[in-house]
Image (cartoon, rainbow, N blue to C red):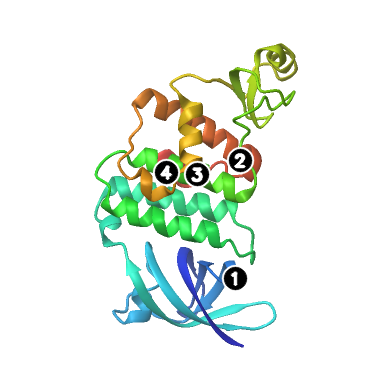
Amino acid sequence: MLTDTEGIVLRQVKTSYGRRMILLFSKKYGKISAGTSIAERGKNKSSLALRPFTYGRYELFKNRDSYNINSADVLKSYYGIGEDVDKYMNGAYVLEFTERVLSEEVPAPAIFNLLIDFFDLLEMRKKGIGTLVLAYQTKVFKYSGVMPQLERCAVCGEKKAAVKFSVKEGGIVCGDCLQSIENLERHTLIYDVKFGILDILKYFTANPLKKLENLALKEDAGKLLQKIIRDYAAYYLDASDLKSEKLI
């Protein structure tokens, strides 16, 4: 069956006889693996659409258990990301993170559109790239159904003042519940709620990514939030030990 879809290349692997296996985040089918014989270094429109940080339209041949990319067109190429080391490293990390959290052949249009918005902003951004990455990851939590509880204690469900953030409990913890949690978990994956991080997470969640284009967190808040988000992603989405994580 011939079909087509918009998509973003997450990763590619060379196989044999000049073929490659493309891991494609498609808008229609979700994350799929598709073979292709399109030349890697060619200058035609199909070759260009299989390069990193390119948003394209792909013609696929789909049978029962496999896909093949017959041709492709570039819808938008984010050259500016590849020309800046910091942007490239953060972009590569987001692609790897996205690959890890997606399930095979499960459409995720909200995350797909979010990734396009992320690339648009990343290409234009001059500072605060780390803030943009954290906002993207927070929204992925929301769209994946694992958003942390930020309004009520994740243990007792009461609307009490938050004194800690617990990854294992899935959100904020009140003072009354803190002692039992600390005794049980021996202080693992429990964080202070300083530097306004709860307000930051709520702001990330409530606003479109494009509205955050000029937001840049201070270093102390950014480092704490990065630690929390990475631990949370590892615990709930199995997004741990990413190869690109050490580069940013």
Q: Earlier in the sequence, mark 4 or mark 2?
A: 4
Q: Label 1, on which residue?
A: 29
Q: Earlier in the sequence, mark 3 or mark 2?
A: 3
Name which residue lies at 61% across and 29% down.
151
Q: Residue furthest front?
A: 159
Q: Earlier in the sequence, mark 4 or mark 1?
A: 1
Rendered image quadrant of residue 165: top right
For mark 3, give the secondary structure.
helix
Q: Label 2, on which residue?
A: 147
Disc 4 residue type (three-letter)? Val
Name which residue lies at 57% across and 41% down.
240
Residue 203 drawn at (x, y percent): 46, 36
Mark 2 crowdedness (10 Å alpha carbons): few <14, some 14-19, many ≥20: some
Cβ atoms under marks 4 and 2 closer than 8 Å: no
Q: CA distance from mark 1 to mark 3?
A: 21 Å
Q: Label 3, on which residue?
A: 137
For mark 2, give the secondary structure.
loop
Q: Which mark is residue 133?
A: 4
Mark 3 crowdedness (10 Å alpha carbons): few <14, some 14-19, many ≥20: many
Q: In this view of the protein, which residue sits in the foreground, 174 or 219?
A: 174
Q: CA distance from mark 4 to mark 3?
A: 6 Å
Compared with residue 212, is residue 165 higher up or lower down, i.e. above or below?
A: above
Name which residue lies at 41% across and 48% down.
209
Residue 143 drawn at (x, y percent): 58, 50
Cβ atoms under marks 4 and 3 closer than 8 Å: yes
